[in-house]
Image (spheres, rainbow, N blue to C red):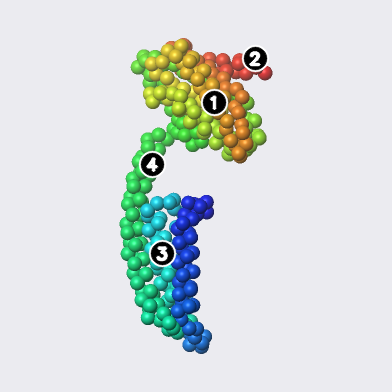
Amino acid sequence: MNFELIKQHWMLAATSITMFISAVLVSVLGSESTSLLNVEWSDAVGEGSVVMLTVVWTVAVLISRPAGKVTSLLVLGLNLFTFSALLDFFDEFTEPGVLGEWISVFESLPAAMGMVIMSFALYGWHKEQVALNGQLRRRELNYRQHQDIDTITLLYRANYFQQRAQQLIDEQKEAALIVVDVVKFTRVNRQFGLEEGDRVLREIAQLLLMNIRNTDLACRYAGDRFILLLPGMSIVQADVLAKQIQHSIESVVFKPNGNALLVNRVRCALGTLTDASSLEQTLRILNQSLDKQSERAA
């Protein structure tokens, strides 16, 4: 539940309050009070409970759903039903007055209209749920097929990268590699906390995806290091891409806890799948290159 959603529904909320007040005024001004000795308290409690529940349901809709046709119909239907329920509740404490005959009509007609409107709303809600369930099934199937996805960055893990890279090696296909290292990222975790650090990593992952082709593969390699597998790309092209990625990440202002943060330095190591006799040796060379860059900068 998100109380911020009420800001989107200020007109619906105002309508609900207006109808509630209108029902109270119609009951008070159009009837005459009766002795409490004549009140059927069991009926009053039951009808009062119906009013409370419809009000609670209305609030629940307003704080749980985004703006839209279904939300508007649900609130309107509940308002009409609440209007009738309020008149019915106050009827236990009053006797017919000037508007006695009209009140008897209002007690039943809005409730019937409200039920019809809510029926249309529930049908729309049903269609929403059918669509959402279809999406969830597709996402669940996708997750089962891709269990190597990193839960923080939503990129693939290193083991999936190794599988794909080895497949290209076996097929004797060329590919460039870029290892991207965010320098001194641990300071982000220390300063803003692990949760915000994870969020920044997730945003960096999105920047990587924005800079690569659909045929390329971006993976979280380890900690704050990422690795890109770029089939059919030459080392010269990869060097241009690496510079673009460095500029992209270093130019973005991240906002952990609302504070401005610039990632001061991003280092990249480049290679190809044919640089060494094995994939493990290639990865070792790339990681050693990043470590040497860190040593020279220290």
Specify whether residue 46 is in view.
no
Give how far across and how far down residue 256 sits, in percent.
59, 37
Tell me the element at label 4: helix
Tell me the element at label 1: helix
Tell me the element at label 3: helix
Q: Label for residue 249?
A: 1
**Crowd tier of the residue under label 2, counting other residues whose Cα lies within 10 Å: few below 14, some 14–19, many 20 or above:** few
Give how far across and how far down residue 13 sits, in percent.
48, 59
Q: Residue at x 33, y 45 (%)?
A: 134
Q: Amino acid at mark 4?
A: Glu
Residue located beneath label 3 in the image: 78
Q: Which of pointers 1 and 4 indicates the residue nearer the eye?
A: 1
Q: Residue at x 46, y 11 (%)?
A: 236
Instruction: Please state which of residues 252 and 193 is positioned toward the viewer in this rendering.
Output: 252
Instruction: Please state which of residues 150 and 96 is positioned toward the viewer in this rendering.
Output: 96
Which of pointers 2 and 3 lies earlier in the amino acid sequence?
3
Q: Amino acid at mark 3?
A: Leu
Residue located beneath label 2 in the image: 296
